[in-house]
């Protein structure tokens, strides 16, 4: 399972993109630190980030959306834009490829939300 | 045997008959145990193996169930989805990337593949393959290569590779009795289900209750616990039953494979997982929120976005498994 998070500016420029993989990480032939992939070469677990049953898994992303510069000797961080579009999708890709018709399955709906930094000083 | 000859000479034909009756009384039940589930001689061809486990007659009375099953991957367990044949590709990879690479597998070329090699996959993907000779393993490999090398267009190979499957007779006969010492072994003339009685079929006139027909143990035989250490080269394909036991039941989960995959889904014998939208919706909820905020550190304001995704797994096992 892969959780994709993308943040774009209102005009479509991508400013952030990440993906988080959730799956059992099998151990190659049950030895060493190496991961196996094909069923014929897996006999153990290195770690497991699959979604456990009866549980809620939380993935949180804190994303910097600024450019930093010095003004009069001071650090100033200015937002890259006033508005952004956040998109989140959850896919199951049993063979690891999103562009693989018949082997790519989206779970739930695509999340899309506009977020913004307000103008002014806030009081 | 020497004792038998000696007595028969001394006692005449009546004594011989008595001894034969005694021997047969002892031998017949043993023969029955020995013959099942490996019924008779081993299949020499894919067609013979398919005929040995031909469930097409079930369609006559159970057409709806049969059509449901025909849509499931159980109908194509060594082939995989018709549009991609991914299972076939994975089994081929096990031969080329695994067996042909390992020094002690006995497989240097595809012509070396025997039943004992394919069993690493077919223990679950085609359990009845152990009732076939190595010629069937070779036939499977031949059509496997032909199908993939044809760019997945070879219809004859597709037809051959999809006619051997996990059908009615595997779950309702061959693999139906799990605790054989407690419940007995499978009988060749019996269909196993949820009740005892008669069954209107000339080949399977008896109906018998299998205690675990609706239990997760039935599915767990293949959708299993992890590495299959009983094999010369252990494989680890499915781990669902392990997750079910240790993550779901152990945590208070109360439902069974049948309840979710067959009843609540409404899919019946069209047993599906992630390829079904119904099952996807039943399994996972995704809740997301996002907001913008400014972190203040002294005089520096830092524009940030917070994206929080909550993934709720409602299934009776981890997702994904493997």
Image (cartoon, helix red, strand yellow):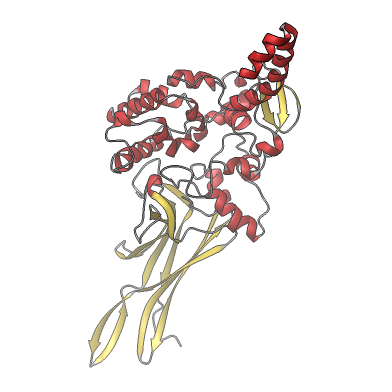
Q: Is residue B5 above or below residue B167?
A: above
Residue at image location 43% in from the left, 38% down from the top: B121
Number of numbered discs visible in the structure rendering? 0
Residue B39 appears at what percent x and percent y?
Answer: 57, 22
Q: Horizontally, is A24 left or right of A72 in the view?
A: right
Residue A61 appears at what percent x and percent y?
Answer: 42, 70
Q: Quadrant of residue A60?
A: bottom left
In this view of the protein, which residue sits in the foreground, B256 or B70?
A: B256
Q: Is residue B320 above or below residue B307?
A: above
Residue at image location 69% in from the left, 33% down from the top: B184
Q: Quadrant of residue A78?
A: bottom left
| Residue B1 shows in the view | no
Residue A62 appears at what percent x and percent y?
Answer: 40, 73
Q: Is residue A72 above or below residue B283?
A: below
Residue B233 appears at what percent x and percent y?
Answer: 41, 44
In this view of the protein, which residue sits in the foreground, B104 or B10?
A: B10
In this view of the protein, which residue sits in the foreground, A33 or B32?
A: B32
| Residue B112 shows in the view | yes
In the picture, which quadrant includes the N terminus of chain B? top right
Q: Is residue B2 above or below residue A78?
A: above
Residue at image location 56% in from the left, 38% down from the top: B271
In this view of the protein, which residue sits in the foreground, B81 or B55?
A: B55
């Amino acid at each position: 399972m892969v959780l994709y998070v993308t943040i774009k500016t209102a005009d479509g420029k991508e400013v952030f993109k990440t993906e988080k993989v959730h799956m059992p990480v099998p151990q190659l032939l049950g030895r060493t630190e190496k991961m196996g992939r094909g069923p014929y070469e897996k006999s153990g677990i290195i770690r497991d980030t699959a979604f456990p049953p009866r549980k809620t898994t939380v993935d949180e992303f804190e994303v910097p959306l600024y450019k930093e510069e010095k003004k009069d000797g001071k650090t100033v961080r200015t937002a890259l834009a006033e508005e952004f579009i956040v998109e989140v999708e959850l896919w199951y890709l049993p063979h690891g490829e999103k562009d693989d018709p018949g082997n790519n399955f989206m779970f739930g709906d695509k999340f899309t939300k506009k977020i913004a930094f307000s103008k002014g000083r806030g009081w | 045997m020497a004792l038998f000859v000696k007595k028969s000479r001394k006692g005449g034909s009546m004594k011989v008959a008595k001894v034969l009756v005694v021997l047969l009384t002892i031998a017949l039940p043993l023969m029955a145990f020995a013959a099942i589930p490996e019924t008779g001689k081993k299949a020499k061809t894919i067609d013979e193996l398919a005929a040995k486990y031909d469930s097409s007659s079930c369609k006559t009375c159970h057409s709806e169930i049969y059509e449901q099953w025909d849509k499931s991957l159980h109908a194509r367990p060594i082939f995989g989805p018709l549009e991609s044949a991914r299972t076939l590709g994975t089994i081929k990879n096990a031969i080329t990337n695994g067996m042909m690479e390992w020094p002690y597998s006995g497989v240097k070329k595809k012509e070396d593949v025997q039943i004992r090699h394919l069993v690493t996959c077919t223990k679950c993907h085609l359990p009845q393959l152990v009732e076939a000779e190595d010629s069937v393993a070779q036939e499977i490999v031949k059509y496997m290569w032909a199908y993939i090398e044809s760019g997945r267009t070879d219809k004859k190979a597709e037809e051959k590779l999809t006619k051997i499957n996990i059908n009615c007779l595997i779950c309702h006969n061959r693999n139906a009795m799990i605790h054989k010492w407690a419940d007995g072994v499978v009988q060749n003339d019996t269909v196993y289900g949820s009740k005892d009685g008669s069954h209107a079929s000339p080949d399977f006139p008896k109906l018998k209750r299998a205690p675990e027909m609706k239990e997760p143990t039935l599915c767990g035989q293949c959708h299993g616990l992890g590495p299959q250490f009983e094999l010369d080269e252990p494989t680890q394909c499915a781990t669902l039953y392990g997750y079910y036991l240790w993550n779901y039941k152990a945590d208070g989960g109360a439902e069974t494979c049948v309840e979710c995959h067959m009843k609540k889904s409404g899919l019946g014998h069209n047993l599906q997982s992630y390829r079904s939208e119904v099952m996807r919706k039943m399994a996972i909820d995704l809740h997301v929120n996002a907001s913008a905020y400014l972190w203040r550190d002294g005089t520096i304001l830092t524009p940030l976005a917070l994206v929080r995704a909550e993934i709720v797994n409602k299934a009776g096992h981890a997702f994904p498994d493997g």
